[in-house]
Image (tube, rainbow, N blue to C red):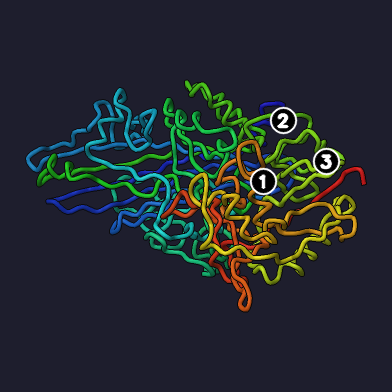
Amino acid sequence: MTPEKKKQRRLRNLALLSLLLLAVGGTFAFQAFNQRAINDRLNEVDINVGGRVHDYYNRDTENKDVFVENYGERPIMARIRLSEFLETRQRNEANFTPLVAGTSRDDVENWTTWIPSAGNINDRANNNPSNAFDQYASLIFGWERSGQDAPWYMPTFNHDNLDLRTAAAGHARDWIEGNGATDAVTDGATHPGDGIDAYWSANENFDNSGPIWPGEEVTNQTAQNLQQDRAPMTMNQWSNLPNEDKIGNFWVVDHNTGWAYWANRLDSEQASSYLLDAAEMTADIEDKVFNGFYYYGIHVESGLVHPDQHEEFLNDGEQHHAELADLLHGIQNGVMFDDGPNPLPNEDSAPAAFDFSTMRPGRIFTMAGEQYRYLENMGSGNHMIIRNGVITNIPLTQHEAELNTWRQALAPEVQAMIQPVSVPFIGPAILDENIVWEGGWRWIMSDSSLAQFPDAAADITQVDSGGTPRAFTLSVADVLRLSGPGRAFPNRVSRVGAGNLIWWTRTLSSQSPNPDTGWLVQRARPDIPVAAGELISHWSTNSSGAYGGMRPALIINPAN
């Protein structure tokens, strides 16, 4: 590829963000600059590929939300890096003194790169100039709120991937819109909102007629950030994860360079979880300046590339962590291992391209426009698979109609492979109060517990030549036998639906005369992280919402 074509295919944000904190006489105000971003087209055809870095900031509450949105039509990979600056001046002094010698407020390029310790993202490295800031500034990473869903945001109106500005809301200011000012006064917002925590919520709209903010004169509706699968971590911590957990919706920081990488492809109309959620000054800063002044800033660089161009992140002349290439390759492929001749998990392929006999349980694959998780080889050429994502807003009581609708919309070559089954759409009940759990948090029901409910224990999905070729919902008995090391669901997190969504089993949890509750697979909850993948039983069978629903499964036979 020629350098010019390579440039045309490259999508990149070079971002500048300054958080300015100025204190006088014991009181302080907080102001932020947002990113300076460059978004080039990825190719020469007219396909909109682009990303925007969002910065929501409020100086009164010190809320600070930094994340990446993909507003384009193709997936992207993202990274962000922070650097810091602090200077102080007593009232009897004429000049400010920088915390780190050789740095200056007006030259953000020489600010001190934030470097965490190898084992703790919340602790700056001891053997690095970054450690000087530990005493005075505390950075809060990731997003967790007890009992709350992932936050909501207003998608960017600016879909011009040659526009350098990004989405700066509240007291944040875009570097270009604010003319690069470092006076803590100049405005430069480019996006609606006042920057407070949870400013946006579900089903809100904003009309950008005018336009009021840079971009298209349209009305946007709020969208939801991705729920983080786990808190941001360092590369060393990432290295210790099992392979099946290494790719997902979370940030991984290379503690050699300070670059934080989103550990998954960011698909069209998705927004990452927060890398940075707050930047708080400690009490020590007041002791240091007493009745004087201080100025604190954070500078953010960001890089966005198409997955095919992930080597851009490696070929930048920096000394990266030895395993970064593995991480980037895993993000590109959507998986950390190679399991034979099958197409990569994110590569949409025709059914004929797959050799299901070589697939390992739990393997993700994309076939004829749908992404699935491979569950098991059932013998005689039959294979059980399940949709990787959850179809939301569908209660258990509507599964029969909705499963048929979903199946009929599949590609004809997929429909031709579907095998007959005769399982119920809503199956026999298991009463929760009689269950003994094994293997940790509501993970596996003991054999003796399940044996109390023989009808439900026998509700196992198998091929039945006397049945009908159709889609079905897994029973609790199915989920249990597919859970465990080497199986389709090797751990609790793997049972959660893609996008951190709840999904129904077909097993009830109450009996006549009022069989009105059923069993579900729980998502990850911020207040109870270990709840991810647990089996819960208290939901009404008429319940539905954006947080969960139906996860269709199939038995297929490619020889048909």
Q: Mark 2 or mark 1: which comes first in sequence?
A: 2
Rendered location of residue 462, percent (x, y): 79, 52
* Within-10-Å neighbours for mark 1: few <14, some 14–19, many 20+: some
Residue 165 is at least partly visible in this image: no
Q: Which residue is mark 3?
A: 379
Contact flag, marks 3 and 1 (Cβ < 8 Å): no
Q: Quadrant of the N terminus?
A: top right
Residue sitting at 64 percent across and 32 percent down?
309
Rendered location of residue 224, percent (x, y): 53, 58
Which residue ends up furthest to the bottom in the rendered image? 513
The CA distance from mark 3 to mark 1 is: 15 Å
* Within-10-Å neighbours for mark 3: few <14, some 14–19, many 20+: few
Q: Secondary structure at mark 2?
A: loop
Rendered location of residue 353, percent (x, y): 84, 38
* Within-10-Å neighbours for mark 2: few <14, some 14–19, many 20+: few
User: On residue 339, which mark appears?
Assistant: 2
The CA distance from mark 2 to mark 1 is: 19 Å
